[in-house]
Amino acid sequence: MGAKWLPRYPGCFVCGDPRENPLALGLEFLLEDGVVRASFVPQKEHAGYPGIVHGGILVSLLDEASIWAASAAAQAFCVTRSLSVEFLQPAKVGEPITVLAQVEGREGRLLQVQARVEDPGGRILAQSLGSFFPRFRQGWAKLMGAGNERRGCHGAQGGEDRKAG
């Protein structure tokens, strides 16, 4: 399976397009070989303490990446049942970070997803383990089905129209 850019939902705090949602972080998620990833450079507005990224921002990144990983595996939009997070090192404002997530297993209908936030050197700053429930199968098929590669949620851009790198 090749790399595929995942769609954006305009109202989403994490993946929304800042041109449509000024409060959105604007992450763009790439799915490749079952791993979802996105990069982000936190700004001073994302700090909890001076120079340190707020833990809630990191949790949002972990949750969003995990939802996309679970949704791709289940072929249905998933919702979070639980998410356990460990903060290992501070993420610093102005320094790039990458969030990665992949499904590690299933328990009944629930998908178990591990995710992590890394610095450019691959050092893990935060990690999570979550359970995700497939909820919206029809919406996933409509969004991700054949012929819809360029259409995102509610008309937002998505699919394979961006260069995978």
Image (cartoon, rainbow, N blue to C red):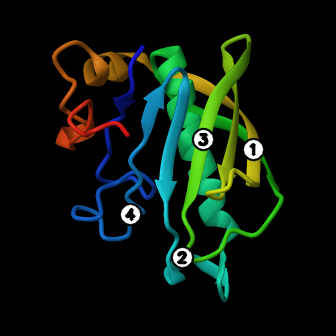
First reached walking from the N terminus: tag 2 or tag 1 = 2
Tag 1 residue: 128
Tag 3 residue: 100
In the rendered structure, are the residues bearing label 2 and label 1 in contact, judged by CB atoms less than 8 Å apart?
A: no
Residue at 55% in and 22% down = 34
In the image, 138 versus 50, the foreground residue is 50
Mark 2–mark 4 Cα distance, whole angstroms, equals 17 Å
Tag 2 residue: 94
Mark 2–mark 1 Cα distance, whole angstroms, equals 23 Å
Tag 4 residue: 24
Instruction: Return the residue found at the far front.
Output: 121
Which quadrant of the rendered structure holds the C terminus?
Answer: top left
First reached walking from the N terminus: tag 4 or tag 3 = 4
Q: Mark 1 belongs to which amino acid?
A: Ser
Q: Is residue 88 above or below residue 37?
A: below
In the rendered structure, are the residues bearing label 1 and label 3 in contact, judged by CB atoms less than 8 Å apart?
A: no
Q: Residues within 10 Å of mark 1 (few under 14, many from 20)?
A: some
Residue at 63% in and 48% down = 62
Mark 4–mark 3 Cα distance, whole angstroms, equals 19 Å
Residue at 25% in and 30% down = 160
Q: Is residue 20 above or below residue 92?
A: above
Q: Is residue 106 above or below residue 143?
A: above
Mark 1–mark 4 Cα distance, whole angstroms, equals 22 Å
For label 3, the SS is strand
First reached walking from the N terminus: tag 1 or tag 3 = 3
Q: Quadrant of residue 87?
A: bottom right
